[in-house]
Amino acid sequence: MTTFNLPDLGEGLAEAEIVRWHIKVGDQIKVDQPMVAVETAKAVVEVPSPYSGVIRALHGNPGDMIATGAALVEFDVAAAPNARPAPAKAPERPKADDSGTVVGSMPTTNEEEFIETAVAGGNSGAPRERVRAAPAVRALAKRLGVDLARISGSGRGGLITVDDVMTTSGPTALHTAATVTALKTPATAPRSAVPVAAGEPEKLRGLRRAMAQSMSMARDSVMQCTLFDDADLHHWVKGQDFTIRLLRAIAAGCRAEPGLNAWYDGEAQSRRLLPRVDVAMAVDAPDGLLVPVIRDVGGRKAEELRADVDRLKRTARDRTVAAEDLRDFSFMLSNFGMIAGRYATPVVVPPAVAILGAGRLSHDVIAVMGGIEAHLRMPLSLTFDHRCVTGGEAARFLAALMRDLERDS
């Protein structure tokens, strides 16, 4: 009997939640066949099998939290035809050596390494390199379009880790936990539905845990400053699409002040201005907050943007959003006024440097020459990272955004 323990999923987390099992006791399983989907604060990860064999025991049900290193699956390796023999037991290492263990490396009672042979540069005639990466890391790299042969692994002995893949795929893939959240959870996935009694503590899981980590990181690393104003929509023609007008106005603000469409590296104190405006729009999903990205808001037609917004909101709410739709944003939008609230202090998530909050529309009494009028107005709250954006830049951005919003069409 061989016991497989829940690995450290490359995030330094103490536990993960079982989302669904792909196997049951008595099943025959092959090496690299998906066994179980587990959810951490960053992602839902499909964990593959390190052995061929017969499943003898499963430890935990969907919704259960399993501690890293705890028993998860028991195999009868000898019972499977053509089973791969269990590797010899590795020498004992200090506990600290395992801190870099990644998704799919799956330390068991007998530790095993996973080595993939890859071709550098994609030339089948070139000398082949040995790329050390776990099956789940290879699957993640394939999903994100990352060539493992071009990565220098930071794990023990050159092992390629999840963070190596995320860093290669783009800055926001590593730095924003909420953005990386879904690798992905179908809406039909079993979830823990046990109600929590009033007054009893409830441990944060999944998206809510990701939000907690992301907000803590923002609090500790960003100098947040917020400007407030109101856009006058009195001259709008009937039938305007509020969300699309907001996206277009953000693009206009970024053209006026490109410094707000940027990434900032606080450790290196370096700023990168981005040529395209990709807006992450917060979606209030049943399980927590997801932030899909609308691409190139300044270079696409209104109908294209509307179709994309509808698609992303739908996939975010049923948890089928693709990983590529959750990363590499350059600006952020919180349209909380669709529910309630006039002004807010929305939080910038690094490495982005600005977020716009749009409040609830209202008819305000405005003084005009010769009297007063009731005008439809949109409250705006612009939070920016004051480490790399000046107050003047933020004010000019907001002024340009408001000018675009206040056009009749």
Image (cartoon, rainbow, N blue to C red):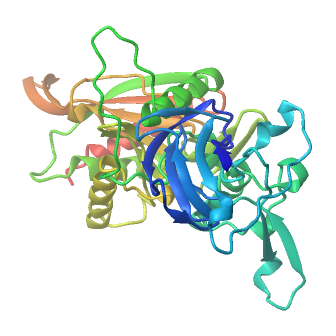
Q: Is residue 360 visible?
A: yes
Query: Which residue is pictured at 34% across the width and 26% down the height?
Result: 229
In the picture, residue 216 is in which quadrant? top right
**Seen from this angle, which residue lies furthest front?**
79
Give x and y (percent) for residue 294.
41, 55
Q: Is residue 314 above or below residue 379?
A: below
Residue nearest the observer in this picture, 121 or 384: 121
Closest to the observer, 159 or 61: 61
Q: Give residue 223's quadrant in the image.
A: top right
Instruction: Residue at 55%, 23% (x, y): give it.
Output: 224
**Viewed as shown, does residue 382 lie left or right of 120?**
left
Measured along the vertical axis of the image, is residue 366 above or below residue 353? above
Q: Is residue 51 visible?
A: no
- Whole-percent x, y for residue 73 in the image: 58, 47
Kindly identify the residue that appears in the image at 30 percent across and 28 percent down.
194
Indicate whether 256 appears above or below 196.
below
- Count the numbered circles shown: 0
Q: Quadrant of the C terminus?
A: bottom left
The furthest residue to the top = 199
Query: Residue at the bottom extreme?
Result: 125
Relative to residue 390, is residue 44 depicted above or below? Answer: below
Residue 399, given in percent of the width and then of the height, sits at 40, 37
The image position of residue 111, as x and y in percent, is: 79, 49
Q: Nearer the viewer, residue 3 or 252?
A: 3
> Relative to 11, is 204 on the left or the right?
left
Horizontally, residue 312 falls left or right of residue 389, namely: left
